[in-house]
Image (cartoon, grey):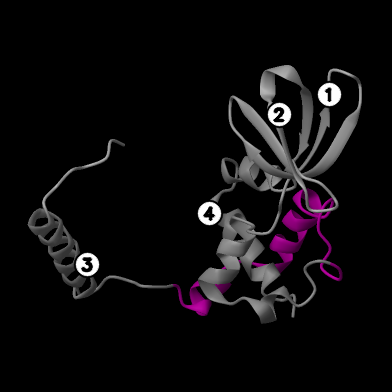
Amino acid sequence: MPRFSLPDQDIAALVAFIHTQKTKAESQVGGRRGVDVADLQTGNAQAGKQYFDGHCSSCHSPTGDLAGVATRYQGLKLEEHMLYPERARAKVTVTLPSGETISGKLAYQDEFTIGLDDASGWYHSWPAKQVKYKIDDPAEAHVTLLEQYTDADIHNLMAYIQTLR
């Protein structure tokens, strides 16, 4: 987006407008600002466990990484955590033209550049066209499933995940 060259008075007017619109939106009645935990317990926990066993258990364990997840997150935060995992950082292995490989956590990627943080915390980057790289993204399965979930799948899975205390 191009930089705007506006007088201070116009910038102040824009800021005032945005604040007014935010206040107006927040004052509307009937709008939900969150999700009640009971709304997320409408599914069948047993059907959710079956879905979990068939789609999620190759990467997750109710007694491992998900043990106690329902005590750490409730309501909408629990559902957001399930659908859009925050800390699932991709790993990448870069093969240089010399054949040397360097692996680490994916730090940057666009059509021109691939970058990683190595085990020592050092950042490395290369022009994407000059190296070969393989990305292992643990959240990729979550992204793929977003297109496949039915409402029943989500309700059932959420009912099951809420039992993981």
Where, quadrant-wise, is the C terminus in this rendering? bottom right
Q: Looking at the image, is mark 1 or mark 4 earlier in the sequence?
A: 1
Q: Looking at the image, is mark 1 or mark 2 earlier in the sequence?
A: 1
Q: Is mark 2 on a helix, strand or loop?
A: strand
Q: Are marks 1 and 4 in contact (CB under 8 Å)?
A: no
Q: Is residue 62 magenta?
A: yes
- Of badges 3 and 2, nearer the viewer stands 2
- Residue 151's label in the rendered image is 4
Q: Where is residue 94 in the image (x, y as percent from the top left)?
A: 81, 30
Identified by mark 1, the residue type is Leu
Examine the rendered structure and indicate whether residue 118 appears above or below residue 76: above
- Of badges 3 and 1, nearer the viewer stands 1
Identified by mark 3, the residue type is Lys
Q: Please report the bounds of the magenta region as a residue range.
A: 35-64
Q: Are marks 3 and 1 in contact (CB under 8 Å)?
A: no
Position of 33 with respect to 64 (left or right) is: left
Q: Position of residue 143 (x, y in %)?
A: 62, 44
Out of 149 and 142, give the one closest to the viewer.
Answer: 142
Report which residue position mark 2 lands on: 126
- Of badges 4 and 2, nearer the viewer stands 2
Q: Do the residues labelled 3 and 2 touch (CB within 8 Å)?
A: no
Where, quadrant-wise, is the N terminus in this rendering? top left
Q: Where is residue 95 in the image (x, y as percent from the top left)?
A: 84, 26
Examine the rendered structure and indicate whether residue 50 appears above or below residue 129: below
Report which residue position mark 3 lands on: 22
Cα distance between the residues tagged 4 and 2:
42 Å
Cα distance between the residues tagged 1 and 4:
45 Å
